[in-house]
Amino acid sequence: MDLSKIKALIDFVGQSNVSELAVTEKDVTVRIFRNHKSSHAYASAAVVAITSESATAETQAAAAPVKAPVFGVLHRAPAPGEPPFVKLGDAVEEGQTLFVIEAMKVFNTISAPCSGRIVHLTDIDGGEVETGNLLAEIA
């Protein structure tokens, strides 16, 4: 994929409501994620990964990060005194609830982006997390 196509994709994401875009051409994949903190079109979209097909198997074997999508109070259990949703080493399925983040009395469910095993888990429980904080990793 040539640079003019990549630039056009970045412009598209920067000027639209799209938050994530992945485009594959031949054996190259370009993933672009929207950065909501900036208002400049070029700064609001960033190329996160450009991979070839041969590197895809390695990428899939790497741990998938689970990051806080909003600022708020992180809860690792559904209610006080109950066991946590997940523990380090647990096997999880895609879509399974991992955490709840409370923001302005709204409870946001944080789900597993993929199936796998929890290889990293935050120590925070009942404390504040910032948008983008790493909460867990799934391998």
Image: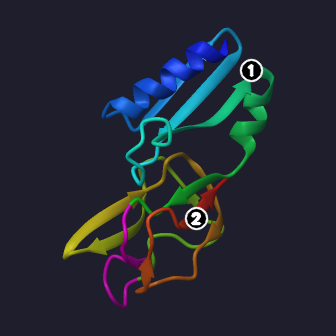
Q: Is residue 75 above or below residue 136?
A: below
* Residue 80 sits in quarter: bottom left
Snapshot quadrant of residue 104? bottom left
> Residue sitting at 31 percent across and 82 percent down?
79
List the residue tagged with mark 2. Answer: 136
Q: Residue furthest left?
A: 105
Q: Main secondary structure of the magenta part?
A: loop
Residue 44: image location, x then y, percent: 45, 42
Q: Residue at x 55, y 22 (%)?
A: 7
Count of numbered tags: 2
Residue lying at the far bottom of the rendered structure: 81
Q: Amino acid at mark 1?
A: Glu
Residue pointed to by mark 1: 53
Left or right: 40 with respect to 26?
A: left
The residue closer to the viewer here, 43 or 2, is 43
Crowd tier of the residue under label 2, counting other residues whose Cα lies within 10 Å: few below 14, some 14–19, many 20 or above: many
Question: In the rendered structure, which disc, 2 or 1, sits on the residue that comes first in sequence?
Answer: 1
The boundaries of the magenta stretch are 70-82
Query: Which residue is drawn at the image coordinates 64% and 22% (left, top)?
Result: 29
Residue closer to the observer: 135 or 71: 71
Q: Please tell me whether residue 57 is drawn above or below residue 4 in the rendered image.
A: below
Q: Is residue 108 above or below residue 139?
A: below
The percent position of residue 11, horizontal first and vertical second, equals 45, 26
